[in-house]
Image (tube, rainbow, N blue to C red):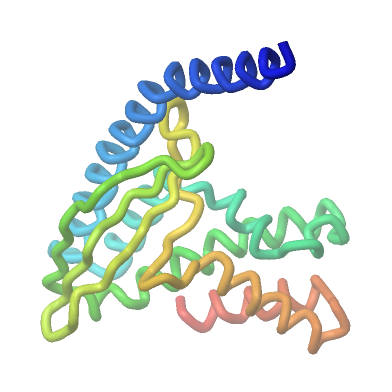
Amino acid sequence: MIYRRPFLSFAAASALLAASAPARAQGAEKATAFMKSLGDQLVAVVNGAGTPSSKRAAMTRIIDTYVDVDGIGKFCLGRYWRLATPEQQKQYINLFHEVLVTNITSKLGEYQGVTYTMGRSRMQDEDAVVSTTVVRPNNPPTAVDWIIANPLTYPKVTDVIAEGTSLRLTQRQDYASYLAHNNNSVDALISAMRNQVSQSS
């Protein structure tokens, strides 16, 4: 009898894993379809004709649809999010969205002729990881992993990992460094973000 409880625990765990396997496979499958749609739309905007303003508008719509901008913004601000006032939080999130769009659209010309291929998809805890390879003319292929939250219900991109580097973690470190050198002032960061947007417009 001494082995009965561990055996039952193992059996229960095995049954749980077996039951969750189809859901995890379906999550990876849904994430693949989600990423294929996103990738096709991104490539169409980058390679397509259009004015900078029309491409910015198209890219904004894609980001609003496929990316968890608010969640990424909160992550990037880190502990300072809790220290910020509601008004500071509102200003920061609005500016973070503008900065994200600006950073992407300012580089559209560099990506002309871009193509991508889909790789494998897998579940990592509750998120899906979809691997892709991005190719630009006269550049070596770049391995890009897309982290997608809630793949079965309400999928959104929460991070992009290019050649092993997390873009949201890098941005978080940059913001933390800036705040550390500016008396931990969220207002100073908001002002810097506003300047960045205005200079790029």
As drawn, the residue found furthest toward the front would be: 1
Residue in the image at 71% along x and 77% along y = 191
**In the rendered image, the vertical position of residue 39 relative to residue 111, given as above or below:** above
Q: Residue at x 52, y 37 (%)?
A: 126
| Residue at 60 percent of width and 50 percent of height | 70
Quick one: quadrant of the C terminus?
bottom left
Compared with residue 110, is residue 164 higher up or lower down, i.e. above or below? above
Number of marks present in the image shown: 0
Q: Is residue 182 left or right of residue 44?
A: right
Quadrant of residue 135 within the rendered picture: bottom left
**Quarter of the figure with residue 11:** top right
Placement of 137 over or under 124, stated as above or below: below
Q: Nearer the viewer, residue 150 or 108?
A: 150
Going by the image, does 101 lie left or right of 51? right
Residue 34: percent from the left, percent from the top? 31, 39
* Of the pair 1 and 14, the residue shown nearer to us: 1
Image position of 138 (left or right of 6): left
User: Seen in the image, is 152 located left or right of residue 32?
Assistant: right
Could you say which is closer to the camera, residue 22 or residue 75?
22
Position in image of residue 24 (x %, y %) = 40, 29
Q: Name the residue rendered at 18%, 64% in the picture.
A: 50
List x then y, in percent, for residue 40.
19, 50
* The N terminus: image quadrant: top right
Across and down, in percent, residue 78 comes to 73, 62
Q: Nearer the viewer, residue 48 or 166?
A: 166
Q: Quadrant of residue 97?
A: bottom right
In the picture as drawn, the residue positioned furthest to the bottom comes out as 181
